Amino acid sequence: MLLAIDAGNTNTVFAVYGDGEGESEVRGQWRAATNAERTADEYAVWLSQLMALKGLDREDVDDAIISTVVPQALFSLRTLCRTYFDCDPLVVGQGVDLGIEALVDNPSEVGSDRLVNAVAAHQSYPGPLILIDFGTATTFDVVDAEGNFRGGAFAPGINLSLEALHSAAAALPRIAVQRPTEVIGRNTVACMQSGVYWGYISLTEGIVGRIKQEYRATIADSDMTVVATGGLAPLFADGTEVIEHVDGELTLRGLVAIHRHNRATE
């Protein structure tokens, strides 16, 4: 079976795939807060116990793949795979063939998560595509009809914006993100929720509209499919028609596809 690890800025997701005939079935999935100081031993104790609750054993895993945007976390994750799962993991971005190209000024600067999402989305949806990831940052990525990564745009993530607002203004509390019933708030919390929610809806609609206009003018006169991922994607997709699909498993599915592609060519 395959252990897929997606280490983001906020959370690290571990998933085990395999059904005896391939890597199509998710046997277990677990999430931990990303901590670059966590050791391989700590990961092993935590993960082994969670796998056991699913009836899985470390010996069931015979291969692994890692995607991380936190370079400091890679050593422990790679050591985890080598020491406790007896396999040398593929690491996205280190000589791994993605099956697509990054057609940008500096391909090495592109976060591995963005490329992994591009691989999965190209296999699942008609291109060209706009991928929106509501994560630590809100990212907008463009994938052409051939699956190649074309660049995109960044904005601060929703929770990051809320934390900055609370930290910079002493009278403003921490709030949870939710869709308000009205745009015009009548108290402090309602005003904050409206500004954040409808502000990010407008951000999404505005950037998607401008990307589509620019893409048609400079690359191809073609409609673009919009796919959203990340924990808050369903909440924001509910507030706008520009998001056509919500896919919470995009990154993990991309890791499985990249692993399959590379092992097939060995």
Image: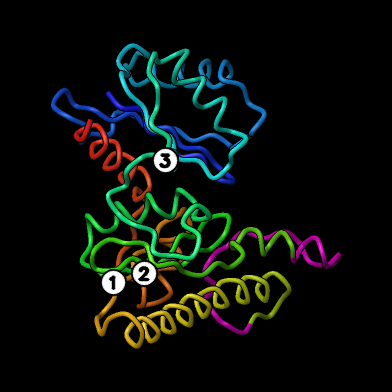
Contact flag, marks 2 and 1 (Cβ < 8 Å):
yes
Judge whether 227 appears above or below 204 on screen: above
Residue shown at 47% from the left, 21% from the top: 47
Magenta part of the protein: which range?
A: 165-184
Mark toward the viewer: 2 or 3: 3
Measure the C-alpha gap from mark 1 to mark 3: 25 Å
Q: Spot the residue most to the right.
A: 170
- Specify the label residue 92 is tagged with: 3
Image quadrant where one finds the C terminus: top left
Measured as percent of width and height from the top left, residue 124 is found at 22, 56
Element marked by disc 3: loop
Q: Is 172 a magenta residue?
A: yes
Mark earlier in primary sequence (2, 3):
3
For the stretch drawn in magenta, what is the main secondary structure? loop
Answer with left or right where residue 29 lies relative to residue 127: right
Location of mark 1 (residue): 225
- Residue 11 falls in which quadrant of the image? top right
Q: Is residue 98 placed above or below 233 in the rendered structure? A: above
Indicate the secondary structure of the residue bearing disc 2.
strand
Query: Is 151 left, or right, of 25 in this rendering?
Result: right
Residue plotted at (40% across, 21% down):
88
- Of tags 1 and 3, the one toward the viewer is 3
- Which circle's residue, 2 or 1, is located before the other in the chain? 2
Q: Quadrant of residue 211?
A: bottom left
> What x and y, as percent, mark residue 237?
40, 68
Amino acid tagged 1: Thr
Q: On the image, numbered disc 2 is attached to which residue?
A: 130
Magenta stretch contains residue 47: no
Left-right relation of 112 to 193? left
Residue 165 in view in this figure: yes
- Give the Cα distance between marks 2 and 1: 6 Å
Circle 1 crowding by C-alpha within 10 Å: few under 14, some 14–19, many from 20 = many
